[in-house]
């Protein structure tokens, strides 16, 4: 394969790899986009599997991108990547003609493209694929070390998806990302009497524990203990659920717990915190930090956070997650390009 063809293949690989990583970073968000696709194509019966389908496709996309950059199994990868690009192009043509009110989700929450922009992007990738792989019979052979570099990158991508599935996104690009003020992006919720109580999250140090899906009893008990501990550390704790007071009452929920629970739209809670049962720290109406359900802070951690300036907590977390994400991405590219 001559130099120009390799450059075209590498460009396609970079786009697919970055797109796959960004989608894998936020499995919940990718699942929501997949739900919209399934609904549009009248496949709503697959809704429960939307997150799995989205993650599987994102992993395949990133692995194909890594293989294109490494240049391994060139004929097989050429056919596989060409098939995926053709599928994407057909989908975007349909979306461009139908113009549904939905985002393509090509690059997760980071870059939002119109249907026309998405179609143009895919047509450019199709053209690059033709330049890179036609004729398919003259693609050349890769260096053997490239199979090692691809294997290392593949393992890293699988581990990254596993990490993302068990936590919240390393980088948050939602409407409720850290740093957002609630007076600019309101968080709507109401109490058991259907009275809006949004102001409770706008003053002082607040910990919002949100659950957008039903929790097991042991998980609910853990959140109740966490709320008690947070209150002892001087935080106002709000439990937000994606249900209604009437539904909770019908389930026989303890009246005392019902009185301390607030209710919000499911998609709003999914946007607030991607983890079901996760916690969000809000200081004087500004979102500061988030935790997944599996990594809720201890009493000592909450005490330490309370002693620090909220902006210091915000910047420290952002700098750390930015460094981790950039480090991971650069390492994957370095292994593929340099090894």
Image (tube, grey):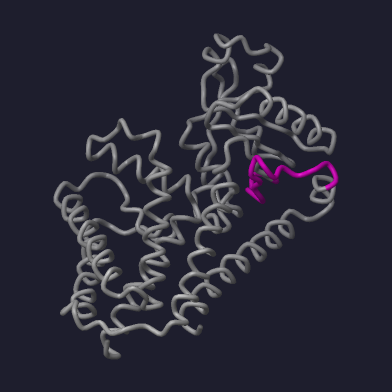
Horizontal and vertical percent position of residue 233: 84, 38
Quadrant where the N terminus is found in the figure: bottom left
Quarter of the view holding residue 284: top right
Image side of residue 260 versus residue 122, left or right: right
Q: Is residue 299 magenta?
A: yes
Tell me which residue sits at (39%, 48%) in the image. 54
What residue range appears in magenta?
Answer: 283-300
Outermost residue toward the bottom in this view: 3
Q: Is residue 119 above or below residue 184?
A: below
Nearest the eye: 82 or 254: 82
Image side of residue 247 versus residue 70, left or right: right
Nearest the eye: 154 or 252: 154
Horizontal and vertical percent position of residue 153: 50, 69
Tell me which residue sits at (33%, 77%) in the image. 11
Q: Is residue 254 above or below residue 70?
A: above
Tell me which residue sits at (65%, 17%) in the image. 258
Q: Report the number of discs.
A: 0
Nearest the eye: 74 or 85: 74
Q: Is residue 289 magenta?
A: yes
Horizontal and vertical percent position of residue 285: 64, 44
Quarter of the view holding residue 69: bottom left
Tell me which residue sits at (79%, 50%) in the image. 305
Outermost residue toward the front in this view: 144
Horizontal and vertical percent position of residue 278: 63, 39
């Amino acid at each position: 394969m001559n130099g120009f063809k390799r450059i075209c293949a590498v460009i396609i690989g970079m786009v697919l790899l970055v797109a796959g990583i960004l989608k894998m970073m936020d499995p919940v968000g990718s699942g929501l986009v997949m739900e919209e696709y399934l609904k549009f194509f009248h496949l709503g019966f697959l809704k429960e599997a939307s997150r799995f389908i989205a993650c599987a496709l994102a992993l395949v996309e990133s692995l194909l991108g890594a293989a294109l950059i490494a240049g391994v199994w060139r004929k097989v990868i050429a056919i596989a990547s060409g098939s995926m690009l053709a599928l994407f192009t057909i989908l975007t043509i349909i979306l461009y003609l139908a113009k549904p009110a939905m985002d393509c989700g090509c690059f997760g929450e980071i870059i939002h493209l119109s249907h026309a922009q998405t179609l143009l992007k895919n047509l450019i990738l199709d053209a690059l694929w033709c330049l890179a792989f036609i004729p398919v019979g003259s693609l050349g052979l890769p260096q053997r070390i490239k199979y090692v570099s691809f294997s290392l990158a593949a393992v890293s991508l699988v581990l990254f998806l596993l990490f993302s599935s068990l936590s919240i996104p390393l980088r948050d690009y939602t409407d409720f990302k850290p740093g957002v003020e609630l007076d600019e992006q309101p968080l709507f919720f109401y109490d058991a009497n259907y009275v809006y109580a949004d102001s409770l999250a706008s003053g002082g140090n607040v910990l919002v524990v949100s659950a957008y899906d039903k929790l097991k009893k042991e998980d609910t008990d853990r959140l109740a203990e966490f709320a008690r501990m947070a209150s002892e550390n001087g935080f106002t704790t709000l439990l937000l659920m994606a249900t209604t007071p009437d539904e909770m009452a019908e389930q026989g929920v303890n009246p005392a717990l019902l009185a301390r629970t607030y209710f919000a739209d499911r998609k709003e809670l999914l946007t607030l915190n991607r983890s079901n049962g996760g916690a969000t720290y809000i200081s004087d109406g500004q979102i500061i930090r988030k935790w997944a359900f599996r990594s809720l802070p201890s009493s000592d951690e909450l005490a330490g956070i309370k002693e620090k300036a909220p902006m210091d907590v915000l910047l420290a977390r952002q700098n750390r997650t930015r460094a981790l994400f950039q480090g991971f991405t650069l390492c994957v590219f370095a292994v593929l390009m340099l090894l």
